[in-house]
Image (tube, helix red, strand yellow):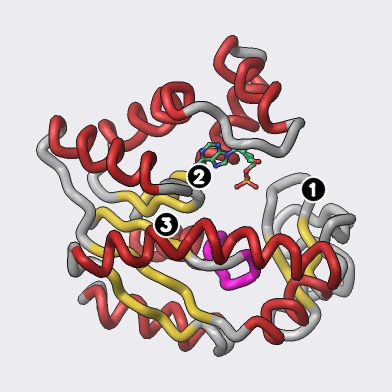
Amino acid sequence: MNLIIIGPQGSGKGVYSRRLESKYGIKAISPGQLFREEFAKGSEIGKKANEYMTKGILVPLDITLKVILPVIKTTKGFVLDGFPRDLEQAKALDQELEKLGKKIDYVLFLEVPEDVLIKRLSTRTICPKCGEIFNTITLKPKVEGICDKCVAELIHREDDNPEAIKQRLKISRKETEPLIEYYNEKETLMRIDSDRPPEPVIKGIAERLGLE
Ligand code: AMP
């Protein structure tokens, strides 16, 4: 099954795409993560992408496709997290998938009220080592301040403060709206109530996708 997961920051995209991978073997593909891996390897593509990432702007489409397409080609099912970010990327993805005889089955749109997102993001901590995400409301680590997976000390992102969060949510809403419209017209959009604890959300997703 080929999926895209979209939604504002804090809606649980990273959490649920990782869960879909670990529980159902649907490969999670995140361009941001792939770029970081390429940069860590010291590859040319990683160095190029890093020039844009450090400025906080989107990496050009041809470079982005170069990192995600090899994974899409070699995997049976995938969930894209962080791609597409705009209509140009959505259309390019459709074209590339068509060449491969593949298509997107569903687009999961995670919906959460804004006040809940602000609360979640301002209490969010991240593992600097493995990228696992926690918050002090619905996703508490077993030991406070320590990653469940790799026992590293969790950090709080500097830009996870209410003012910066509001600004990022505004930008992300503007970014997401045309994509929602695009996939709604294609009838692949699946709205998911993500204002619940993770377990019922993942169970609901799995049921609606027929995975259980
Ligand atoms: P993220 O890990 O999603 O926070 O992304 C980190 C950085 O990777 C972004 O600031 C962009 O520079 C780049 N990036 C992530 N996703 C995309 C995308 N779909 N298209 C272009 N650049 C991206």
12 inside magenta stretch: yes
Is residue 122 visible to the viewer in this orientation of the structure? Answer: yes
Label 2 – label 3 distance at C-alpha: 12 Å
* Residue 104 drawn above or below residue 72: below
Q: Which residue is drawn at 37% across and 68% down?
A: 108
List the residue tagged with mark 3: 21
Q: Where is residue 208 in the image (x, y as percent from the top left)?
A: 26, 80
Q: Residue at x 77, y 81 (%)?
A: 119
* Residue 125 drawn above or below residue 128: below
Residue 71, labelled with which disc?
none
62 horizontally vs 90: left or right: right
102 horizontally vs 62: left or right: left
Residue 128, labelled with which disc?
1
Q: Position of residue 26 (x, y in %)?
A: 34, 55
Is tag 2's residue or tag 1's residue first in the polypeptide sequence? Answer: 2
Is tag 2's residue or tag 3's residue first in the polypeptide sequence? Answer: 3
Residue extent of the magenta highlight: 9-14
Q: In front: mark 2 or mark 3? A: 2
* Residue 149 drawn above or below residue 89: below
Kindly indicate whether the residue at mark 3 contacts the one at mark 1 (C-beta within 8 angstroms).
no
Label 1 residue SS: loop
